[in-house]
Image (cartoon, rainbow, N blue to C red):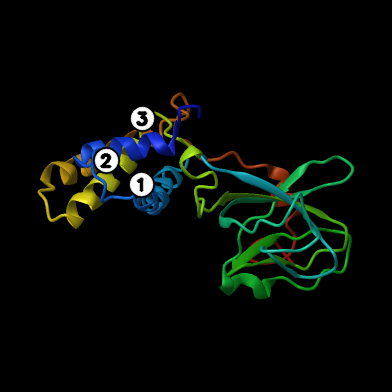
Amino acid sequence: MARTVLVSTLIDRALKLADKEASTFTPRADVMDLMLVKYAEYYGLLVKAGCQYFESIVTLTTDGASSWSLLSGAVWSPSAPADFWGILRLDYIQTPTTRARPVPAAMLQEIHFFSPQTGGSWARRHRIAGNTLYLYPPPLTGQAYRLMYIPCAMATFASGETTTLDGVNGWEQLLVVEAALDLKVKDHRETDYLVNERERLIKWIQQQADEREAAMPSRVPAIDVLDAEYDTWGSPFGGY
């Protein structure tokens, strides 16, 4: 993605759309705050499309525990995923081959299937509760697990009005319309056009956002038969 735009430009566009570009009673900082709130909603639309518009990767090196905080800890490299929102996938990285073995999610009702670790194998399932990652069975010390996850939307525009946002394909206009709509609501002015424009933009983004891999047909993910071979921790994931 490379269609970047300055927050200052978006503020100018919102003030103009709200007929307040010459107003001395609407602080630009207030408009920026409105946009920051709306940015989280815009971010959520792109995440829901499922095309990895936002992705971060960290590595967990196990230390003999069975659970780890996502917020802090020296076990994470390059740093703890303190901005974690949702998981994309978790893999055990074998040594010395560096082959990735998927560690899918376990339902809470399934975790009793996994006995304590007694050999040199790896965790077969994971579970995330709150800000804690659990691995089942508890892995041995020194194993590497790669966590691919969706980070949360930014909590602040770090550089103020000089912060750049990625509008992808002109989609930043949703932030402009949302901010202008809020400004008009505060002034008790007519908002029908902006309400309709907001709905149009949301539908447009939803329709286009999942076309990032436009040539990729819908299909069932491929299965590695070796994953089934190595999954021997018992029903429903194999025999005892």
Q: Are marks 1 and 3 in contact (CB under 8 Å)?
A: no
User: Residue at left 60%, top 60%?
Assistant: 105
Spatial CA span between label 1 and label 2: 9 Å
Q: For this view, does 189 lie left or right of residue 36?
A: left
- Amino acid at dot 1: Arg
Label 1, residues with CA under 10 Å away: few <14, some 14-19, many ≥20: some
- Element carrying mark 3: loop
Q: How far from the left and from the top, in percent, is residue 222?
A: 59, 38
Label 3, residues with CA under 10 Å away: few <14, some 14-19, many ≥20: few
Q: Which residue is mark 2?
A: 15
Q: In front: 186, or 105?
A: 186
User: Which numbered circle lies on residue 28?
Assistant: 1
**Dot placed on the residue nearer the N-terminal end, 3 or 2:** 2
Q: Does 237 appear above or below 39?
A: below
Label 3 or label 2, whichever lies nearer to me, is 2
**Dot placed on the residue nearer the N-terminal end, 1 or 3:** 1
- Amino acid at dot 3: Gly
Q: Which residue is mark 3?
A: 170
- Element carrying mark 1: helix
Residue furthest front in the image: 24
- Element carrying mark 2: helix
Q: In front: 3, or 230?
A: 3
